[in-house]
Amino acid sequence: MGFDESVLICDKVDPILNKILTDNGLAVTYDPEITPEQILEKISNFNIVIVRSRTKITKEMIDKADNCKIIGRVGVGLDNIDLDAAKAKDIRVINAVEGAMNAVAELVIGLMFTLARNVKVGDMGIRNNEWPKNEMLGTELKGKYLGIIGMGNIGKRLGRLARALNMNIIGFDVMPIDEEFAKEVGLMKADLDTLLSSSDYVSIHVPLIDSTYHLIDAKKMSLMKKTARIINTSRGGVVDEDALYDAIKNGNLGGAALDVFEKEPAPGHKLSELSNVILTPHAGAQTKEAQSLAANVIAEKIVQILRGVI
Ligand code: NAD
């Protein structure tokens, strides 16, 4: 039996989402360039609203969403949706935690290798007609200490990949860390300060909530080794970017890789001045596999909700 709900897809998503919903009888409007003003104007016509990360679903929009039953986020973090407003209006908010797990963890591994081997220096040199072989002298990941802050889905996947590279893994989470997983990867559990002072690489995988805003600030950075590198693929705002800039510029940190920024988009970000920093445009989940998986998960969840199964 098909459904007759209307769906507004506000961001660019894998076409499989549209297909599954349409196959189930839903009337889908795909408008990946829609503006906030247009959403405000149209939102009351839709029963289901779907976003990725470009669109922010604000309280003002939700207040107008009188026919909305479900807001779907084709991704993990829900910080672009006003959850309190949705709850107050009895709108169910769903996400796809499974989609990005491997994609983000693989990006972190890639960023660690890129930092460790000074890949950027070699690439930029050749583009500038140079041959900077000596400047590329780097280090290996094998045997280095990787501190993972937030041992959820992505943190665990990263732990497994890093273990395969013979890195030593230190983990910190506010929730108890699964014992079986800890044994599997030889994880050393530590408090945050011990993790920071012991790690060669620190990778962050926590949600952005009040308690994690500027979790890594100047004081925390001062605990780290001068050669250590920070990788943030979680959410901008978890790392204090001004403090990070100062720490790297003054030689108190070895470098950093950021995929997420306090204010996005962030073209020409001031950290791009520093050669031992790598910046990517919130592309952690930007793989064909992750996009397709997340779109499938959201489509299936919507169908199951409409069937009353979940
Ligand atoms: P998850 O919910 O599975 O794991 C998050 C973990 O952080 C949990 O174990 C939680 O207990 C822990 N945590 C919360 N507060 C903490 C604190 N103060 N200190 C230490 N640990 C704390 O989430 P996930 O799927 O692993 O995603 C992690 C982050 O990655 C989220 O911020 C998500 O939005 C982000 N993300 C980014 C991209 C990207 O494109 N860069 C893609 C997907 C997810």
Image: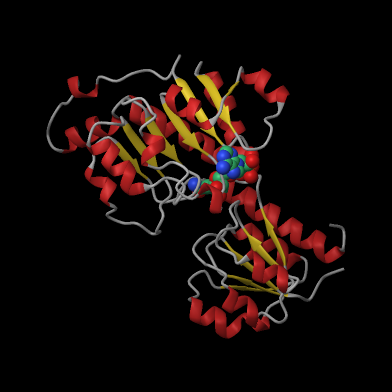
* Image spot of residue 268 (x, y percent): 27, 54
* Image spot of residue 165 (x, y percent): 50, 19
Which quarter of the frame holds ligand 1? top right
Residue at the bottom extreme of this rendering: 41
Give the residue at x 72% y 23%.
Answer: 180
Q: Picture quarter containing residue 62?
A: bottom right
Taking the image as drawn, is residue 101 in sight?
A: no
Residue at the left extreme of this rendering: 129
* Image spot of residue 89 (x, y percent): 72, 74
In the rendered structure, the answer to whether residue 10 lies left or right of residue 282 reads right
* Image spot of residue 146 (x, y percent): 48, 25
In the rendered structure, the answer to whether residue 176 lies left or right of residue 211 reads right
Taking the image as drawn, is residue 19 in sight?
A: yes
Toward the viewer: 91 or 125? 91
Q: Is residue 217 above or below residue 90?
A: above
Q: In which quarter of the image is the N terminus?
A: bottom right
Q: In which quarter of the image is the C terminus?
A: bottom right
Give the residue at x 56% y 25%.
Answer: 190
Toward the viewer: 125 or 55? 55
Give the residue at x 70% y 82%.
Answer: 66
In the rendered structure, the answer to whether residue 109 lies left or right of residue 207 reads left
Q: In this view, does 42 lie above or below 147?
A: below
